Amino acid sequence: MSSRFTGFWFRQHFYTTPYSSGNLSYLEICKMQNRKSEMRQVALLRRNGAFAQNHTAGEKLAQWFPQSIKATGTIVAGYIPIGSEIDPLPLMRELRGQGAKLCLPRVNLAYNSLGFHLYEFGDALTTSAFGISEPSPNQEKVTPQLLLVPLLAFDKKCNRLGYGKGFYDRAISELKGIHEVIAIGLAYAAQEFNFVPNEPHDQKLDWVMTEAQSINREAEVQMVNK
């Protein structure tokens, strides 16, 4: 099994401790989690299909980076794609060329969290026991201002459905406690749903970028057919 798909197994199956769901009742929590579980199955099928049919989606997505966001001097957290995730590397190269600094996440299982370490294209990556490519822990740890976030499903209000482990929800929440952060979800257009269930701990994205459009949560404006 390739590292792309071994790592995907980890994101899907490992460490299922949920977030607190605020004031929702136990029945409401169960219903919400069931809806999310069913949507994840459908979303994964959609994403797998898009991955198989569009091998240049990552390059197309890179053209949709919002011009209102300045990359120069910004620390951008990317990721190495796993499974059928859309490829963020073309966008990461573009942002690096504009003067951004790049970093990648490392999973800290002891704290069920993500840490971010500086990364340059060409740096050696370590492979975790679960097949995820990560930067060396010896690389400088940083707090990014811009996060590129993988996902399974999204809607026009920039609600995000992830893998259910809460890593990025926690990371976004923690970073917001340090400084302003912009979270951009990356996806295929086929991963859009009319409505994505949202619990109190779920962090909304600021933007969603696909191979066909960018969606801004604040302006609720879609930019199509660039």
Image (cartoon, helix red, strand yellow):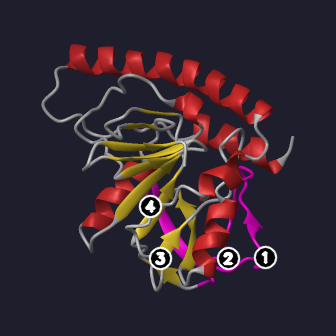
* Residue 71 image label: 3
Q: Which tag, 4 or 2, sits closer to the chain's start?
A: 4
* Residue 124 image label: 1
Q: Residue 90, how many percent across, how many down?
A: 69, 62
Q: Secondary structure at mark 3?
A: loop
Q: Secondary structure at mark 1?
A: loop
Three-letter code for the amino acid on which mark 2 is drawn: Ser
Three-letter code for the amino acid on which mark 1 is drawn: Ala
Q: Secondary structure at mark 4?
A: loop
Q: Which tag, 3 or 4, sits closer to the chain's start?
A: 4
CB within 8 Å, label 1 to label 4: no
Near-viewer residue (73 or 15): 73
To which quarter of the image does residue 133 belong?
bottom right
Q: Which tag, 1 or 3, sits closer to the chain's start?
A: 3
Q: Which residue is mark 4?
A: 66
Residue range of the region highlighted in magenta in the rendering: 110-139
Q: Secondary structure at mark 2?
A: loop
Disc 4 to disc 2, how far (Cα)?
30 Å
Residue at figure coordinates x 48%, y 20% from the top left: 39
Q: Which tag, 3 or 2, sits closer to the chain's start?
A: 3
Tell me the mark number nearer the camera, choosing from 4 and 2: 4
Residue at figure coordinates x 68%, y 37% from the top left: 9
Disc 3 to disc 2, how far (Cα)?
24 Å
CB within 8 Å, label 1 to label 2: yes
Image position of 204 with respect to 96: above or below: above
Disc 1 to disc 3, how far (Cα)?
24 Å
Q: Which residue is mark 2?
A: 136
Q: Residues within 10 Å of mark 2 (few under 14, many from 20)?
A: some
